[in-house]
């Protein structure tokens, strides 16, 4: 058995079922092993940031790590931005990066690059295998790392001779550490704060945004008067009927600072105390009051639901009904508005839809309008590296077991990883992409005006996406995805309804 | 004056005239300064690997560094693959990477990433500015580094407060070191080898592939019987009538090893002794004979033309006419073949065309068929990181002063940076793209068969680009570039001729 075969057997034995791939010459033995050994679903992405973004979306829906297959340092480099987003989403991924043979590296062949240096910034775990006999054990360790709570990016670098040399040894799966329980002291402390203090905010992130944890957080909140809020950017939030109508920490610095100005005690549950996405002159980095006290109920790797349950018990908080989110919204009509689009999505989405949200500026008002939608999962861009939405939707569809994915997608960001549409077509995935075509980097125009100037010709050359307008219908059709343009909410609603009623991908260019 | 203004003034004063850009929030003060201060041409790319690849193409034609404007670590990461290619081409580039404000970085906001770690692997020079007053001086040093022979990648990381704070100081241009002359000893040694030894190969790379150096190398070769060859991958080769019909070191390992098996003395002129692009089981890493003696006439940073002139004087080599490359080829007809396409390009290209070659497997036979074309420049992918061709063509057109660019482009590689078409349309650039649509990763299918197997279903899922076929005409039209499909050499010839006769970009999908 060669190293590549030991790699595939070990990944399969450790429960890795999908490999998102863009291989090159140095990975041919890995490809051959995947071909010979049945069991792994291999999904091609036409650029590596599609590959890594798909692995992120897949984890968010399945909590199983996928493997990625990447080609040398530059192949990894192409995928770094979405690995950055995955790291911020705390997703588990096993990157398998092929590279120059161990003995060939010193010759500095053209594709030789700083693979380890590039991997380090996105990887919780990284290892370069050096011998075929170690590849299996290294793979088992990588999967263990990827599965370690809350989910980690693990990167194996595989010199080609470690794959083609004989002597591979299949490794048994390594035990995955159970998520730590919260400290008893932390639970008692937070209970005391909730009982004794006013102006308490419980900030939920990570798995505290799942259904079970939400119900417990609501119970604690109802018993004590503490308020609940979600972090600004979240990997996966369970929403809709029967779940909490949770607002998020707002994105604009001034709005966030105002929204949090009342807070005296900030309780973190798998969350981070809110700071600005960026700094602005004369604005504080922290968006919560300087004199607020911060209390950690659970760190990112700890079990939020168990901690919230223990907190409710400590508080003696009685069981309560979830809040009534009201009736399902009705479709909106007429000219596109953020609220109208959100209501239309809420009115039409199938039960258990998955929303992949890279709507950027247009989407800031989507949340309140979709509280009363059917049950759904909402996936956000977590690390701010644009180009996340299309791959995330694609991977979520692969991990979603047939659930419809609705990708609410800003046009500028869509162009970063537009190649994902091809994978949606090839894999016949149930993804409905709504391109929000404002034909500019709208968020930057807003930021530019904050700088205190109206953009002139040179600035507009860098902020405007018109001249020429991107033809999204042709773009989708070029990659095998059916598409149509809409200019009203009526049209986008009709097209969405049609798309939801049949299998496969569809793209709607909504001119806004 | 704020730091951003001192940056723009310093870049302009140092001779930087073009900024390839994809800005974000943290670069808004830089964008505002570019808007206020006239003189810089700003060119938007819709993904950063387009941005960096354009800067590479621009340098190769002008030998002036362009600035790039990139957004935080992930924006840089997206552009690393083409910076890798630029590094291998020895192109000069000044990257300006905006980043979190100095005081905001410790808060680990979502977009905070390992910017320096990612920059290091592609940068000959890197500096993170820390104060507005230093930005001008840092920029002058970056331009100096970028201009230092043979051309270097210089990366400035600019925390946003260093751009918006007042106190910017415009810096004077720093002197650019004159390329070193070759060592007199090296010239005498190589002259002795050429006079006394048989089976001598002079390997030309870098600026030794320019017209003047070629003529001198030819003179030395004619006087001594030494053979001439170009490196396998070259940033820019001057070719066509009046230049040398130089072959390259072949790509396939077995072919290269055979082609170099006769060599007893290898003389390097701005070149590297040939090694495999990749290692293969049982094949040597070096592609020249183990017992061949290697002699360095000039290192990469040294002046090849001056050294070759001194060598000719040392040898007393008489002036000779350049070899007759024969008549210009005629257009080929019928089904597409590599040779037929190359002859058709040679028959039709305008004088002083620029060829951007990312033809990968299909293009290996292009060189001999184009020796007798009109004078032209040939730009290759240098670092093996695919996705180079479209951006390279775009940047070369911007630096080419109206010269027609012909991009011979493999389809799989084209998909990596397809967004470049939009920039070609916006800037109305004279670029004719010929997509070589074999609808597979053909080079990998060849490599796969070398592994000793016929690909099964799973392997083909990762090597085949059909299912669905990419519609290149729609793809181009989606981004504002006119396009047509060709299935014969007659058709591709007609379309090329039409495209060369009028301004602006055009794309031809050649189904092969």
Image (tube, coloured by chain):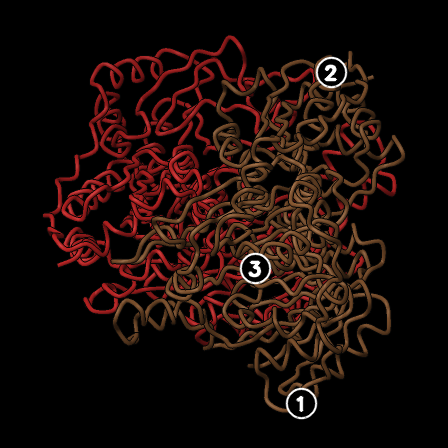
Chain colours: A red, B brown
- Where residue A16 sits, quadrant-wise, is bottom left
The residue under label 1 is B333
**Which chain letter goes with mark 1?**
B
- Quarter of the image where the C terminus of chain B is located: bottom right
* B59 to the left or right of B99: right
Q: CA distance from mark 3 to mark 1?
A: 36 Å
Q: Residue at x 67, y 86 (%)?
A: B332
Q: Residue at x 75, y 64 (%)?
A: B431
The residue under label 3 is A418
| Position in image of residue A508 (x %, y %) | 61, 66
- Quarter of the image where the N terminus of chain B is located: top right
User: Which mark's residue is nearer the viewer, 1 or 2?
Assistant: 1
Q: Residue at x 81, y 29 (%)?
A: B33
| Position in image of residue A509 (x %, y %) | 65, 64
The residue under label 2 is B165
Q: CA distance from mark 2 to mark 3?
A: 37 Å
**SS for dot 2:** loop
Cβ–Cβ under 8 Å for marks 2 and 3? no
């Amino acid at each position: 058995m060669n190293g590549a075969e030991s790699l595939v057997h070990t990944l399969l034995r450790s429960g890795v079922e999908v490999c998102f791939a863009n291989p090159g010459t140095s990975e041919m033995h890995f490809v051959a092993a995947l071909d010979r050994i049945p069991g792994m679903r291999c999904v091609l992405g036409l650029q590596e940031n599609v590959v890594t973004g798909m692995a992120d979306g897949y984890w968010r829906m399945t909590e199983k790590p996928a493997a990625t297959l990447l080609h040398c340092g530059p192949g990894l480099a192409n995928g770094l931005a979405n690995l950055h987003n995955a790291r911020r989403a705390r997703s588990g991924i096993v990157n398998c990066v092929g590279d120059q043979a161990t003995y060939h590296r010193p010759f500095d062949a053209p594709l030789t690059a700083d693979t380890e240096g590039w991997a380090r910034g996105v990887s919780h775990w990284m290892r370069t295998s050096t011998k075929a006999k170690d590849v299996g054990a290294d793979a088992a360790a990588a999967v263990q790392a990827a599965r370690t709570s809350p989910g980690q990016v693990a990167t194996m670098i595989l010199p080609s001779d470690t794959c083609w040399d004989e002597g591979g040894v299949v490794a048994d799966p390594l035990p995955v550490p159970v998520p730590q329980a919260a400290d008893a002291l932390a639970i008692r402390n937070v209970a005391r704060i909730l009982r004794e203090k006013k102006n308490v905010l419980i900030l939920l992130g990570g798995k505290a945004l799942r259904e079970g944890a939400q119900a417990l957080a609501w119970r604690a909140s109802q018993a004590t008067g503490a308020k609940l809020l979600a972090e600004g950017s979240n990997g996966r939030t369970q929403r809709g009927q029967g779940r909490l109508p949770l607002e998020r920490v707002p994105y604009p610095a001034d709005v966030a600072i105002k929204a949090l100005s009342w807070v005296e005690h900030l309780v973190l549950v798998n969350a981070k105390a809110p700071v600005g996405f960026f700094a602005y002159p004369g604005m504080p980095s922290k968006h919560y009051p300087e004199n607020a006290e911060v209390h950690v109920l659970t760190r990112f790797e700890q079990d939020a639901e168990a901690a919230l349950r223990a907190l409710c018990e400590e508080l003696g908080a009685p069981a309560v009904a979830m809040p009534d989110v009201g009736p399902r919204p009705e479709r909106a009509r007429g000219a596109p508005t953020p609220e109208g689009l959100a209501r239309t999505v809420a009115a039409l989405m199938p039960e258990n839809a998955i929303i992949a949200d890279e709507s950027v500026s247009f989407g800031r008002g989507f949340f309140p309008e979709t509280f009363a939608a059917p049950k759904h999962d909402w996936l956000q861009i977590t690390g701010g590296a644009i180009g996340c939405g299309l791959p995330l939707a694609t991977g979520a569809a692969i991990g979603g077991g047939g659930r419809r994915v609705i990708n609410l997608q800003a046009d500028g960001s869509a162009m970063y990883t537009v190649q994902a549409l091809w994978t949606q077509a090839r894999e016949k995935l149930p993804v409905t992409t709504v391109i929000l075509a404002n034909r500019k980097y709208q968020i930057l125009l807003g930021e530019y005006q904050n700088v205190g100037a109206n953009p002139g010709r040179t600035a507009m050359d860098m902020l405007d996406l018109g001249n020429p307008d991107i033809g999204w219908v042709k773009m989708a059709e070029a990659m095998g995805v059916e598409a149509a343009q809409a200019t009203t909410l009526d049209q986008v609603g009709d097209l969405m309804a049609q798309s939801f009623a049949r299998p496969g991908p569809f793209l709607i260019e909504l001119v806004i």
